Amino acid sequence: MKYWQTFLLSLSIHFQYRANLVLWLVVGTIQPMVMIIMWFAILGDRTEVGGYARGDFIVYFLFMTLGWYIVGGSFSREIGRAIRNGDLNKYLLQPYHLVLKCFFRELAWKAVSLAMSLPLFLGVLYLLRGYLSWQMFTGPWWQVALSLLLGSILFALMEAIIGSLAFWVTEIWPFAEMNEMLLNFFGGVLAPISLLPMVVQKMSVYTPFRYIFYEPVAIALGKEGEPVKAILIQVLYIVVVYVVYKLVWKQGLHKYEGNGG
């Protein structure tokens, strides 16, 4: 209930800045449209590339962008700022966990952004409806929903680890930027992993980035031959990353001096 109140309060705050959200949504739509146009140019007169037709590229990049408001976000900087400024002190004395409170604040932003982005993306799908068909969505809905949920948990744990690095370093933004870069490359944000060089495909299997964004989209489009295996790997990564997070947080608290706040 206490985190639910945090969510509702953050929700009301975000609704007061709807104009800013609309601007960010418009800017965020530019990247998938650029990627769609680029792959259309690569296709040329061909009907598909690596099993991806024009409709697949449209859905892939729109789904990937829309998935950011479900799975993604960026609350590691808020965690790092609270640790660096000493604001963590009050959370150590109150029945609130800093990471969970930052997560629910971020969840409110994602909920508002998702609600406002849906009409925009539906409009894009309508304009490009000539390339689309319902047969493209061959993945069972429960597998897609479960994979999205697991990807969201995995992403949140990785954000928590990056934010917790503020116990040791003054600025965590280099780590946050590196994480985003690896996510774009190995997570399929810039291009479907199956279309990347084989060495990158093989490397992505052994990183958690693949299982945050790419797998839910691949399952939805029927591009993942073993969806259940992919989901189980997501669960495994969640367990491993959670253990790492608990160790980092515990060691960080031992080092924490509590200045400021």
Image: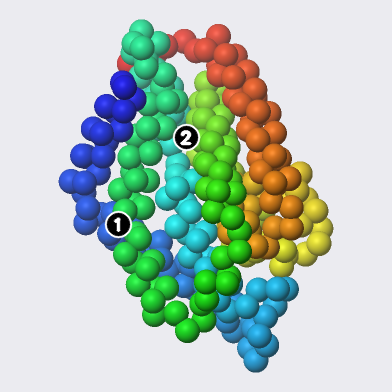
What amino acid is labelled 1 in the image? Met
Judged left or right of residue 40, residue 226 is right
Q: Amino acid at mark 2?
A: Ser
- x, y (%) of residue 83? 43, 22
Q: Position of residue 24 (x, y in %)?
A: 33, 58
Q: Circle 1: is it few (<14), some (14-19), or many (20+) Cα within 10 Å?
A: some
Q: Is residue 143 left or right of residue 127?
A: right
Mark 2 lies on residue: 76
Q: Could one spot residue 60 in this view of the protein?
A: yes
Kind of element beneath mark 2 = helix
Q: Which of the 4 image quadrants contains residue 233?
A: top right
Residue drawn at x 37%, y 26% as measured from the top left: 101
Q: Secondary structure at mark 1?
A: helix
Residue appearing at x 35%, y 60% in the figure: 118
Residue closer to the observer: 215 or 33: 215
In the rendered image, the residue lying farthest to the bottom is 45
Q: Residue at x 34, y 34 (%)?
A: 105
Label 2 neighbour load within 10 Å: few <14, some 14-19, many 20+ = many
Res. 260 in view: no
Q: Quadrant of residue 184?
A: bottom right
Q: Give residue 198's quadrant in the image.
A: bottom right
Front in this rendered view, residue 83 or 108 = 108
Question: On the image, numbered disc 1 is attached to which residue?
Answer: 116
**Image spot of residue 94 (x, y percent):** 34, 11
Q: Residue 174: give x, y in percent of width and height.
A: 55, 41
- Number of marks: 2
Measuring 55% from the left and 48% from the top, which residue is drawn there? 142
Measured along the vertical axis of the image, is residue 123 above or below residue 186? below
* Circle on res. 179: none
How far apart are the two marked residues, 2 and 1, measured between alpha carbons?
Answer: 24 Å
* Mark sitting earlier along the chain (2/1): 2
Image quarter hosting the C terminus: top left
